[in-house]
Amino acid sequence: MAKVSFSCDASFCPHCGTLLPLPGISDVVTCLLCSYKINASVFEGVEEYSCKTYATKVTSKKEKTELDGPLAEKVCPNCGNKRMVYHTLQTRSADEGQTVFYKCPKCKFQETELS
């Protein structure tokens, strides 16, 4: 048995902090990272369990639409509205500029711009 570097839960190696494998039929549990050995009797009566939490979709009263977003001072070529909603995406290779998508909130006209 090697020198203990710090105090921790029985599930972790007290020498390097790595998660220890579950005890098997051997009397000794060996750390897979640093080869620290600990007597398997330390795990007697210890219960391990886990819990998984999954993200859930949170919806607000106002559903987001494609017309939500920042406004650019760009004149709509279809109706002359002075502002258009925009969003950007990297649609080409990384060494090229991004693509800007514009949509008029008044007439729903769509336009793209390669920058």
Image (cartoon, rainbow, N blue to C red):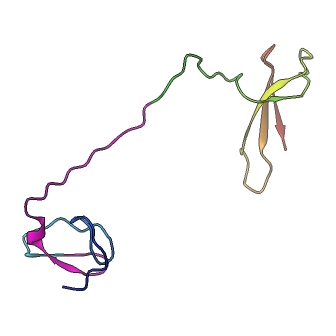
Is the N terminus in the top left, top right, bottom left or bottom right quadrant? bottom left
Quadrant of the image occupied by residue 84 = top right
Is the C terminus in the top left, top right, bottom left or bottom right quadrant? top right
Q: Which residues are magenta?
A: 30-56
Q: Is residue 24 left or right of residue 36?
A: left
Q: Residue at x 32, y 71 (%)?
A: 17
Q: Residue at x 29, y 78 (%)?
A: 15
Q: Is residue 16 left or right of residue 58?
A: left
Q: Is residue 101 magenta?
A: no
Q: Would you place residue 79 above or below residue 55 in this image?
A: above
Residue 94: % across, % down:
73, 55
Q: Would you place residue 112 above or below residue 94 in this image?
A: above
Pick whichever, 83 or 107, lies toward us: 83
Pick whichever, 42 or 95, lies toward us: 42
Q: Is residue 49 magenta?
A: yes
Q: Is residue 2 left or right of residue 53?
A: left
Quadrant of the image occupied by residue 101 = top right
Name the chief secondary structure element in magenta. loop
